[in-house]
Amino acid sequence: MLSNLFSMTLFEITALIISGLLVGFINTLAGGGSIISLSILMMLGLPAPIANGTNRIAIAIHNLVAATSFKQQKVLDLKKGIWLAIPAVAGSVLGAYIAVDINKETFEKAIAVIMLVMLVFVIYKPQNLIIERTKLVKRKVNIWQIVIFFLIGVYGGFIQIGVGYFLLTAIVVSAGYELVKANAIKVLIIFLYSPFAIFVFFVNDQINWAYGLTMTVGNVAGALIASRMAVNKGANFVRWVIVVVILITAAQLFGLVNFKEMMSSLFKTS
């Protein structure tokens, strides 16, 4: 692993850190940043399954950093977050096993449709995202939430792209949290299930550790910046970040733009 790390070119290091910074920022405030990281990893020559596994290294660490930052700022409901994470962790293991040998195009189209549905929800009823519903927050985790978060965990273990949108929607709608606190729980859940998914990819030899650890540097910086901005600027700011990112992500998934080609031209070497 160390020999691969030291043999990386300046171009590879720069591309991974800069893209990681964007991904950490976007994923902490909204979701969908993995489109950028997966595009970069595949552009650098990794097969899709290995890019999918490699991406989880930076995902795990930057969500740990973001969750810690939210906890320090006293907006993370740790107890409720852990209860919601348990079924997601179980689902992520199943999803990761599925991801080892499956085509992801159908799933990407499905999530694009769901993102656009969420976009309507974000714009049409913003009060549901900004105002906390105390009764729902105080309720114990029920069977429907267990099922929902298990299925989200399956998806997160499978491909990761856009799982933040599923989690935010489920946390806001079913648990009643406003967006900033929902974001805090979201990053906690992703951090908690990520090591289990990483293990599955690891035993199937689908992780490039040199690329994953290098990208982590940028991801952590982006996560720290975003977690501070989320608390300082509030739920309405997070809401508009989500709107912009959903539109960009859906455009990529529907084939209207191609981040792989854009990143390739941006970082093209002579």
Image (spheres, grey):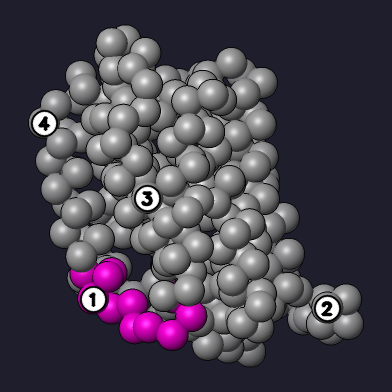
Question: What is the CA distance from the residue labelled 1 to the residue labelled 2?
Answer: 34 Å
On the rendered image, what quadrant is the N terminus found in?
A: bottom right
Residue receiving disc 3:
150
Question: What is the CA distance from the residue labelled 1 to the residue labelled 3?
Answer: 20 Å
Report whether residue 217 is seen. yes
Placement of 52 over or under 237, stated as above or below: below
Residue receiving disc 4:
124
Report whether residue 21 is seen. no
On screen, residue 268 versus residue 36, left or right, reads: right
Foreground label between 1 and 4: 1
Q: Residue at x 54, y 51 (%)?
A: 193
Q: Disc 4 marks which amino acid?
A: Tyr
Residue receiving disc 1:
106
Tell me which label, 1 or 4, sits earlier in the chain: 1
Check disc 3 and report its element: helix, strand or loop.
Answer: helix
Q: Is residue 239 magenta?
A: no
Tell me which label, 1 or 2, sits earlier in the chain: 2
Tell me which label, 3 or 2, sits earlier in the chain: 2
